[in-house]
């Protein structure tokens, strides 16, 4: 029946997420998950919902979460929209803002999903290359015909690098269209751009509970934008896009800021140690402010290293960006997971 499918969907390859082996015992450092279990409050919140029962539909707007997030961020809840992972929020924004033939701008290399979202709309994805130091050239801020949306992950993936709020502010002011700052990894960074949502009328921020709150399996994210935009995005989302278990769990996770502070500190300490050790092994490692590092090697091909690690039960992400080059994106695990990975790399080199 594929002949009934829209031609541009037929031409697409589709987004391929990182490997998620369902069996076997891997040390999993390939999809930037948090290696620590989430706050104990999460399981208690899920249990409480199960005891009440699941026969009723959930709150369509996840009001409990919105209220808590609003308190935490110093905003009114009307500025917040919840989603089934921040990926869903990126999808909702794209569906609301991009028509066939429009243009979506994204940096390269960055999160490959943005490209896929543009393709689904039948829109053009315009990639602007990062400079070698992971700064963005002026072309990223330039006006262009039918430019309707710009995505910027900050911290970026795969590099983990961050553009400072002052540069992002300049960019937002120069752009003639909405700028979505994807802050999926921002809890591991030393700055964020939340203030820009208030300061500029074209900035949207998306955040995730997958990484910093250790809830990738739950699927919960939220978006921060001006209420008039949130109002329009609500029309585009599924009525019940977040289920009752995830709303309760995410709200409980957000409430445990002491857990977040401890886990963030542990991951940042391991990240710094891991980056230093990789450099000692001869890798070039970008200055990461995320829960992963991007490692390239000037003299050794890295794909065999990925394969060698996998053969010994350690999964990292091998990324090859056409025209840019390849590298290993290695998530920050526990100290012992990272030590295993580093030890194997030492042997493989
Ligand atoms: C830059 C970036 N944005 C968003 C996401 C998606 O996060 P979520 O699990 O909240 O959908 C990822 C996941 O890897 C990511 O790397």
Image (cartoon, rainbow, N blue to C red):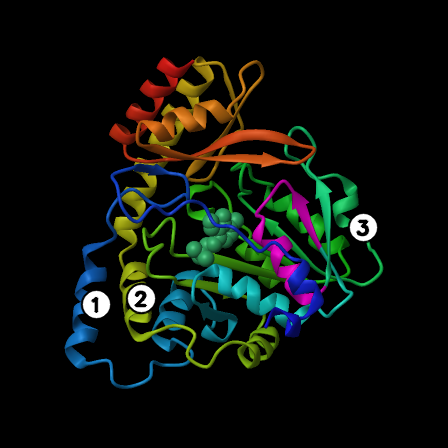
Mark 1 Cα shell of 10 Å, populated few (<14), some (14-19), many (≥20): many
Residue beneath disc 3: 142
- Label 2 CA crowd tier, 10 Å (few <14, some 14–19, many 20+): many
Which element carries disc 1, helix, strand or loop?
helix
Question: Mark 2 or mark 3, which is nearer the start of the sequence?
Answer: 3
Q: Taking the image as drawn, is residue 60 in sight?
A: yes
Image coordinates of residue 58 in percent, x first then y, are 33, 80
Q: Position of residue 283 (x, y in %)?
A: 50, 19
Q: Is 181 or 72 nearer to us in this picture? A: 181
Report the residue at 79% width, 44% height from top: 139
Residue drawn at (55%, 59%), measured in percent from left and top?
Answer: 205
Q: Is mark 2 on a helix, strand or loop?
A: helix
Residue tagged by mark 2?
251
> Splitting the image into 4 quarters, where does residue 335 fall?
top left
Residue 285 in picture, x, y percent from top left: 51, 25
Task: From the top left corner, tell me how far across and down residue 93 is, in percent.
Answer: 60, 67
Who's the residue at 63% across and 40% down the image?
109
Is 160 rendered above or below residue 225? Answer: above
Please give the name of the residue rendered at 78% of the width and 65% of the height, measured from the top-left corner. 101
Looking at the rendered structure, the secondary structure element under dot 3 is: loop
Quickly name the residue at label 1. 45
Q: Does the magenta stretch include residue 315?
A: no
241 vs 98, left or right, is left
Q: How many labels does the image show?
A: 3
| Front residue (pair 209, 202) | 209
Contact check, label 1 and label 2, Cβ < 8 Å: yes
Sequence-first tag of 1 and 2: 1
Please name whichever residue, 340 or 169, is drawn nearer the observer in this view of the structure.
340
Which of the marked residues, 3 or 1, is nearer the chain's N terminus? 1
Residue range (magenta)? 105-122
């Amino acid at each position: 029946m594929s002949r009934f499918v829209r031609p541009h969907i037929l031409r697409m390859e589709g987004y391929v997420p990182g490997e998620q082996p369902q069996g076997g015992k891997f040390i999993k450092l390939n999809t930037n998950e948090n290696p620590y279990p989430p706050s104990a409050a999460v399981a208690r919140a899920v249990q409480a919902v199960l005891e009440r029962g699941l026969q009723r539909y959930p709150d369509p707007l996840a009001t409990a979460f919105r209220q808590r997030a609003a308190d935490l961020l110093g905003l009114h809840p009307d500025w917040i929209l919840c989603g089934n992972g921040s990926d869903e929020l990126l999808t909702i924004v794209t569906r609301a803002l991009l028509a066939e033939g429009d243009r979506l701008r994204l940096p390269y290399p960055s999160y490959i999903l943005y490209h896929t979202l543009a393709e689904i709309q039948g829109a053009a994805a315009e990639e602007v290359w990062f400079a070698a130091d992971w700064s963005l050239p002026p072309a990223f801020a330039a006006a262009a015909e039918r430019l309707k949306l710009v995505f910027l992950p900050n911290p970026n993936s795969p590099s983990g690098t961050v553009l400072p709020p002052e540069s992002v502010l300049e960019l937002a002011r120069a752009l003639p269209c909405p700028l979505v700052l994807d802050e999926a990894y921002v809890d591991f960074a030393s700055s964020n751009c939340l203030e820009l949502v208030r300061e500029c009328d074209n900035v949207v921020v998306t955040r995730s509970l997958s990484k910093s709150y250790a809830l990738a399996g739950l699927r919960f994210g939220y978006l921060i934008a001006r209420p008039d935009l949130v109002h329009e995005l609500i029309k585009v989302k599924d009525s019940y896009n977040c289920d009752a278990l995830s709303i309760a769990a995410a709200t409980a996770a957000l409430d445990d800021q002491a857990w977040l502070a401890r886990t963030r500190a542990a991951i940042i300490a391991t990240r710094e140690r891991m980056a230093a050790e990789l450099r000692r092994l001869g890798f070039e490692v970008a200055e990461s402010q995320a829960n992963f590092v991007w490692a390239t090697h000037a003299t050794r091909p890295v794909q065999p290293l990925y394969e060698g690690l996998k053969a010994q039960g350690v999964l990292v992400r091998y990324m090859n960006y056409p025209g840019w080059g390849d590298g290993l994106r290695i998530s920050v695990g526990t100290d012992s997971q990272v030590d295993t990975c580093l030890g194997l790399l030492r042997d493989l080199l």
